[in-house]
Amino acid sequence: QVQLVESGGGLVQAGGFLRLSCAASGRTFNNYAMAWFRQAPGKEREFVAGITRSGDTAYYADSVKGRFTMSRDNAKNTVTLQMNRLQPEDTAVYYCAADFRLGGVTTTTSLYDYWGQGTQVTVSS
């Protein structure tokens, strides 16, 4: 069993920044790939960013590429999502997720094994 706890959400003006964190516990952290997803009201949950077990490679949705940076610290069992130049369309609940499958990062929501409770990010115009 893995527990994931997100933090760092809030309200920010367009053009601002936020840093989300996700703390993991319960199993060996570097055994699973990690990702951030988001879900806006009335929309499906979508992939935002993912990172490999070692942390050497991160992948991003086109909508956030160049603005968001995902990283992980396997010694501290945490992943972070640095979000810069935020826009109103980034408003959503952000979730971190863990994937125990062998292989690389997937963008498919249903393939992730564990999810955090989510943290709200609201960007005002």
Image (cartoon, rainbow, N blue to C red):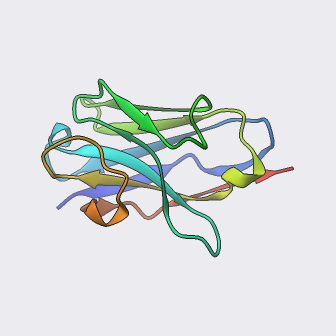
> Residue at image x 35%, y 59%?
108
> Residue at image x 22%, y 28%?
54
> Viewer-proximal residue, 50 or 94?
50
> Residue at image x 56%, y 46%?
8
Q: Position of residue 12 (x, y in %)?
A: 76, 45
Q: Position of residue 67 (x, y in %)?
A: 62, 32
> Residue at image x 63%, y 76%?
42
Q: Position of residue 89 (x, y in %)?
A: 72, 53
> Viewer-proximal residue, 76 or 59?
59
Q: Is residue 92 left or right of residue 27?
A: right
> Viewer-proximal residue, 73 or 66?
66
Q: Position of residue 90 (x, y in %)?
A: 67, 51
Q: Residue furthest top?
A: 56
> Viewer-proximal residue, 80 or 42?
42
Q: Residue furthest bottom?
A: 42
The N terminus - image quarter? bottom left
Q: Is residue 106 left or right of residue 41?
A: left
Instruction: Give the vertical position of 65 relative to 108 (above or below).
Output: above
Instruction: Give the vertical position of 13 relative to 101 (above or below).
Output: above
Q: How many marks?
A: 0
Query: Which image quadrant is residue 85 in?
Result: top right
Q: Residue furthest front?
A: 62
Query: Which image quadrant is residue 86 in?
Result: top right
